[in-house]
Amino acid sequence: EVHLVESGGGLVQPGGSLRLSCAASGFTFSSYWMTWVRQAPGKGLEWVANIKEDGREKNYVDSVKGRFTISRDNARNSLYLQMNSLRAEDTAVYYCARDRRGSYDYWGQGTLVTVSS
Amino acid sequence: DIQMTQSPSTLSASVGDRVTITCRASQSLISWLAWYQQRPGKAPKLLIYKASSLESGVPSRFSGSGSGTEFTLTISSLQPDDFATYYCQQYNSYSRTFGQGTKVEIK
């Protein structure tokens, strides 16, 4: 059974950094693109970033370019999101999701990131 | 970037109603569009991919149609479990985007 479990969320001050992790199991992790999607409180879904199976291609939404870095460790079946220079508008639940040729068939439960002083 | 616009933003309906949600794209997606259902406090769930393909395990009362820039999600007979928020998502480009969501409420 496919499982995705995010961790690493929490309270951070504006300008601070946080690293999110997503532990994957139940499928061949190295065979799938992976994605981060976020949802601000009471708002809709926002695609954040994705990464190719081998990690060699990455894409980001404009609002996080230069501040966030997506990465993966296929040996550890893990996906990461390094978030730097955090802003109040980055406050959201962050989900990792498996990318099955463009649509997202499995999602984690999400981890909450709160950026506040 | 491709912009996605859903309508309506909110929809009030009763159990047994036929419900239709529309999603319009700022450029052609061919058929690279998915639909998701999200219940409060839960992760989204994939319902439809490639515009009209039903995800395994999803009830057949859900259907998707359309191509190019206009797409539709239809629920043929609304059930109590279906009161939720629905999102479309394009994957015609590597920078994906979601629609703003349509909340289906009890009338």
Image (tube, rainbow, N blue to C red):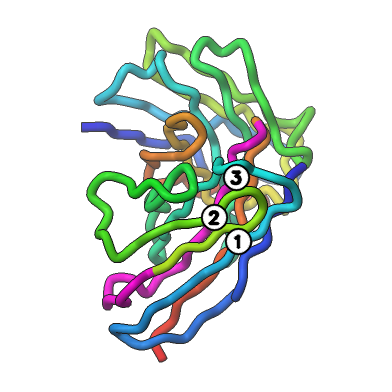
Residue B24 placement (x, y as % from top left) = 66, 59
Check the residue under mark 3 and report the chain it is in: B
Q: Same chain for the residues at labels 2 and 1, yes or no? A: yes
Instruction: Give the residue type at disc 3.
Output: Gln
Q: Same chain for the residues at labels 3 and 2, yes or no? A: yes
Span of residues in magenta: B75-93
Instruction: Give the residue type at disc 1.
Output: Cys
Can residue A117 be seen here? The reply is no
Check the residue under mark 1 and report the chain it is in: B
Q: Are marks 2 and 1 in contact (CB under 8 Å)?
A: yes
Residue A61 placement (x, y as % from top left) = 71, 38
Residue B80 within the segment the image draws in magenta: yes
Between disc 3 and disc 2, the foreground one is: 2
Element carrying mark 2: strand
Residue B90, numbered label? 3
Circle 1 residue: B23
Q: Is residue B24 above or below residue A72?
A: below
